[in-house]
Image (cartoon, rainbow, N blue to C red):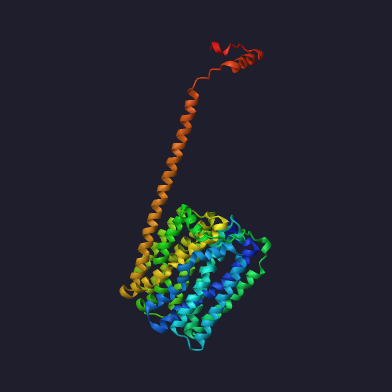
Amino acid sequence: MRRRFRAAARRTFHSLRVRNYRLYFVGQIVSLSGTWMQSVAQAWLVLKLTGSGVALGIVTALQFLPILLAGPWGGVVADRVDKRRLVAVTQTVAGLLALALGVLTVTGVVSLWQVYLIAFLLGCVNLVDMPARQSFVMEMVGREDLPNAVSLNSVVVNAARIVGPAVAGLLIATVGIGICFLLNAASYIAVIMAFVAMRPAELFRGIPVPRKKGQLREGLRYVWSHEELRVPLLLMAVVGTLAYNFSVVFPLLVRETFHSGAGTYGVLYSVMGAGAVVGGLLVASRSSATRPLLAVATFAFGATLLVAAVMPQLWAEVVVMLPVGAASTAFIATSNALLQLGSSAEMRGRVMALFSVVFLGSTPIGGPLIGWIAEAGGPRAALGVGAIATLAVGAAALVGVRRLRRSRRAEEVARSQAVAAAAALAAEEPAPLLTGPAARSSGRSGSRSGGRSRPAARR
């Protein structure tokens, strides 16, 4: 039993044997905990300033609007330059923006337009940071360990989701909102130090793509012409637009449906993060990412969201956040790994930029829309819309996988029947008649071997 457990643990965490990835992993735990603290604090700050669900949707939309408008361009930049240095720069700028928001809040001079501006500037940073950081995972661990490393990244994100919101809720209730932004600014030091300490010689570096015209269109054509890239992106476009709007729905759900405060909001996020850690570890224990796994994860995410939309009591809502988190992480990690494995090295930055566009860049459309639905029909209705949309595309993906399997089985049967028919035809055909030099050669070889040979023309 102990031996099996050790083998499972080695399989689940095997990409951590790579030193560069270990440094990145630890730095991300610290930095992303701060990021989640800021996410919770920012939403609560907007509610404090306005009390509006639409305002929550707008600040979320502004943060991801640059990705929607220019996300593919960020992928072009990521493919052209050294990704390690690029991410170190973007993380530094993100830390400075968090510091500015913290100072404004602590000094009491913060206003809504300042929150909007800083959210937009952070979106401009993420425009380049996300495709560079995600495609850099391949350079740290190589192709073989990529699915495991991507899943462990999801574990880090969601472990931070447990710690960050819980700490943010406690700090908001005790010392105020501003300290959350300041601690997030300090957390970026860890990830920057990790990038500085890496050994460049141990990276699986791709060759930067030379600058030329048409690289953006080239990336779009590349993705659309490959089904293994097109399908995950289409699924993510629907789910990212309508289902991944928790920063809009959860504050309203906590305050208006369950009549509670920031502490409950933090607990809800933390429990969802705990479920997401479990989901990430389960995906990490698998040896590969597959389209059937993606289809199942999509359908499961929609089903658990639908259950969350109808939970009558707070304790039941908290409990159902565990499977919601597990299914959401399985969906994101599998999509990410499929896209990276299915793309070539010179296109990976642009492919992951499109992943950012459909996942996060869709928020400027989905955020205000879901905020409006939450105000008009209630937070439960907003959750339900995302759940039904996710269930629909998940069901379509499952049908597509079944059809693909049937098509492949039919091709295998047809291929085996063709091989059998060819073999049978070859067995039934008479020996070919030999004439001319071939016949004389055959006759001579037969007589030399001592056998009874007749001239081929007489046969």
Image location of residue 352, percent across then percent down: 51, 62
Residue 86 visible somewhere in the drawing:
yes
Residue at position x 40%, y 54% in the image: 397
Image location of residue 101, percent across then percent down: 51, 82
| Image quadrant in which you'd find residue 235 | bottom left
Q: Classify 45 as above or below 337.
A: below
> In the displayed structure, does residue 317 sit left or right of residue 152?
left
Q: Classify 406 as above or below 219.
A: above
Image location of residue 426, percent across then percent down: 50, 26
| Image quadrant in which you'd find residue 436 | top right
Q: Looking at the figure, which quarter contains the N terminus?
A: bottom right
Q: Classify 123 as above or below 180.
A: above
Residue at position x 66%, y 14% in the image: 448
Residue at position x 56%, y 79% in the image: 96
Total numbered badges shown on the rendered structure: 0
Residue farthest front in this picture: 213
Residue at position x 58%, y 11% in the image: 455
Residue 311 visible somewhere in the drawing:
no
Residue 296 or residue 130, whichever sits in front: 130
Image location of residue 449, percent across then percent down: 66, 15
